[in-house]
Amino acid sequence: MSTLLEMREITKVFPGVKALDRVSLTVEAGEIHAICGENGAGKSTLMKVLSGVYPHGTYDGDILYDGQPLANRSIRDSEHKGIIIIHQELALIPLLSIAENLFMGNEVATNGVISWPLAMQKTGELLRRVGLNEPPSAVVGKLGVGKQQLIEIAKALSKNVRLLILDEPTAALQEADADRLLDLMLELKAQGVTQIIISHKLNEIGRVADRITVIRDGTSVSTLNKSDISEDRIIRDMVGRDMAHRYPERTPNPGEMLFEVENWSCMHPEQAGRQMIKGVSLNVRKGEIVGIAGLMGTGRTELAMSIFGRSYGKGHAGTVKMHGKPVDVSTVTKAIQAGISYVTEDRKALGLILEEPILKNISLANLFGIAKNSVLDKRREAQVAEGYRNQLAIRTPGVHQKVMNLSGGNQQKVVLSKWLFTEPQLLILDEPTRGIDVGAKFEIYTIMKDLAEQGRGVLMISSEMPELLGMCDRIYVMNEGRIVGELTRDEASQEKIMALIVKDNGKTTGKVA
Amino acid sequence: MADNQSSLGGHLRENGMLLALVAIVALFSVLVAMQGKPMFLQAPNITNIFLQNGHVIILALGMLLIIVAGHIDLSVGSVAAFTGAVAAYLTVELKLPISIVIPLTLIVGGLIGAAQGYWVAYWRIPSFIVTLAGMLVFRGATLWLLGGQNIGPFPKAFQAMSSGFIPDLTGIGKPHGLTLIVTAIAIAVVIWIGMRARARDAEFGITPEPTGLFWGRTLIISAAMAFVGWQLASFRGLPNVLVVLAILIILYAFFTENTVQGRRIYAVGGNYKAAMLSGIRAERLVFFCFVNMGVLAALAGMMVTARLNSATPKAGTGFELDAIAAVFIGGAAMAGGSGKIIGVVIGALIMGVMNMGMSILGVGIDYQQMIKGLVLLAAVIFDVYNKNK
């Protein structure tokens, strides 16, 4: 086998974060190469360097493709060379047909006039190649995610792909669709298409991959051959350090009952009759950190947001208690008054006003806390922001800095500051370390520990099981809108959590780490 | 370091606007003098800039809130025409006193704003469409109410709204004593506010703008105010319109920058979902912005009707575009979430000075429109360029 791609010592720096630190990757022609690593390890960044999203010159290191140096200036550049990336978020236009999407930007045209019969015919051929039985004129938005994924691959084939990069292709797929996709990958391999797959799912990787490269904290740790692939080895390489040093030391000291949810239910906001949360009961004591584990899309965020001022869903039923007494959480303001805060998983879209400075973001949820008779006291606002800047070590030249200029970790600290300023008794943290580099994660964990030591309750939703196991006193396991189990710190393990989920839905696909 | 830049960037915007206004005034002064016409900055012209553009500034104040909240209102010209017609009808046909006509007309404006804001805020219908419909509906309603005729003239008391001057309580007469006193107080207040803001910047650790720049600008503003005050005093004193404008500008500047609800409007425009999740009732604020716009449109409508001394079916045509242009020249972002009252006022004045200057120079309406369009484009390009830099 010959080497198709060699990336040597790639280093990519963002303001405040070193996303890649001398990462190397070698891909042989005709193989399926898997890349594994934790969230934020740098997998997607590496692929963006390769595909020209980050053009040549914005990173350090060399790329050899077919033995030639590769210096992509744009995505188009790399596509011309047959390097095509299919992102997690599909880039299809939902209102257009399959044929229109397939040849978008690459139209079957002479002198600017599209030949639709030819385009339709070519589309038909490509769809047969990927095994999709839909007419070329079908509107993309009406097809499921699995079929859309196949259209993306067909689109790549239409551009004479030589190196196909799939970024977590099965994350949003049902099991049958995922299976079909993996089969297609093997078929394409037989046809000579080299592929890179980014995935968390070790069972999938084991099925299709010839070799695996593990990336951790922005560096490449190891490349394993198929015969050496074992889950234990991969997990060890992915996680790397000793668990003990990844999380702050803490002595759990749960106090009296703080927060109780009893028999909480709610419906989907649009789809009538679809129940999203099904009779959930849970509780958090003072000084306790409680986790909610579960796969993506099992209703954890929906649960939290529906409790927090009915920000999600409709037809809410159930009781929420603080300090043993029922409280009204029917609006966000009332939930805040009851002492509840919700720190969103999507801080850019739902948590921050990126164009505004740090201090205005911090005061936003409690403007009356810096006002007298509805008139803002800007001196107090700045003092409050400075206070949190020191307390949470927000790294910034000043509190007048726009939050869009901060790194992910510091943005998350601003969101936390905003909610701490509402003086919550209970903080619901939804994926609090998503998209944050490892150093900043430790700081966020330390803040959580401090909050618990102050006697507040923390309810933490996370898809990263190690983080739940490392931080939580108790873990609820959620699946399909229900709580399917509860584990204490001592009982909990990744296997037990997965077992509870698997037992519940009889399916086996699961995310590891 | 970066903080330093961002603060300078902020100052640069406002200073740039002010500089542009000064430059435009200077340009017209020279051009008018070259044509051998009487001085551009003489008392009647200065008075007229405010009389003829008062309605644009008033509409732009409301329009800023709407645009900051992430919306647009295309109906204000038609609403101003309709409310002007309502006021005329009440005054001339029903012979009601202005003490009843003014509040009643403002209420009508508020109701119109509520009717449009309801669909925008609670039904999430794009404001562009709702107010485009409103533009047509209220233009038609104006024609219907006036029966295609003009209504007028008005009693003196009604006309005083737009063409009156404050009485000279000092009894000096010429120059107008009260005008001079008010001017002196205003200058003192401007200097005091500037110094206080500077002191506060220093206290918060924001790098203040260079001392020379601050005093240079304050000197220019003070001198301009003294000059305008003196000119007005030696003519007929402060126009009522200017008094109303000054009160409204101060009120809205305070509301947008120093109150909880004002701040929340910026949050709603900056990130609607994040604002909702922070306990802000975004719908109510958007609704309020439209009600407020309706009331201000009614005020502008009455002022224009009073100035023309008749309500006409064609009144208010193009007002919405003047107001929107003033807001964008003043530095607001199309996407919402940013923009300042003082910028909008300067933006409206730039448009007003250009209108008057070009008319005095005898520039045809054809060129006037082209030039105004290019100025709007240039101002926004300047903004975008600065942001990208």
Image (cartoon, coloured by chain):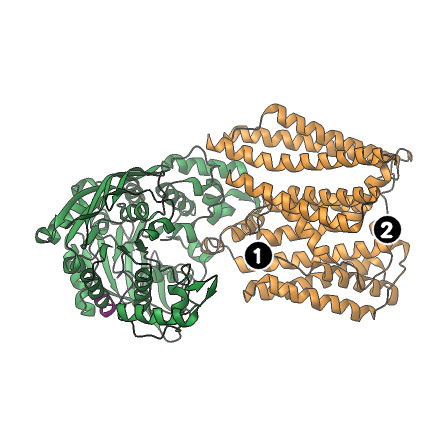
Chain colours: A green, B orange
Residue B15 falls inside the magenta stretch: no
What is the crowding at mark 2: few (fewer than 14 residues within 10 Å), some, or many (at least 20)? some
Query: Observer-nearest residue: A422 or B262?
Result: B262
Q: Is residue A338 left or right of residue A132?
A: right
Q: Chain of mark 2?
A: B
Q: Tell me which segment is drawn in magenta.
A: A168-179
Q: State how far apart marks 1 and 2 are (Cα).
A: 34 Å
Q: Secondary structure at mark 2?
A: helix
The spot of residue B43 in percent (x, y) is: 85, 37
x then y, percent, for residue A349: 42, 53
Specify few, some or many for label 1: CA neighbours under 10 Å numbering under 14, 14-19, or 20 or more.
many
Dot label at residue B296: none
Q: Magenta segment: does it hold A172?
A: yes
User: Is A176 situated left or right of B190 in this image?
Assistant: left
From the viewer's perspective, tell me whether residue A144 is left or right of residue B71: left
Q: Which residue is mark 2?
A: B160
Q: Which residue is mark 1?
A: B285
Q: Secondary structure at mark 1?
A: helix
State which quadrant residue A165 falls in. Answer: bottom left
Residue at 58% in and 49% down: B262
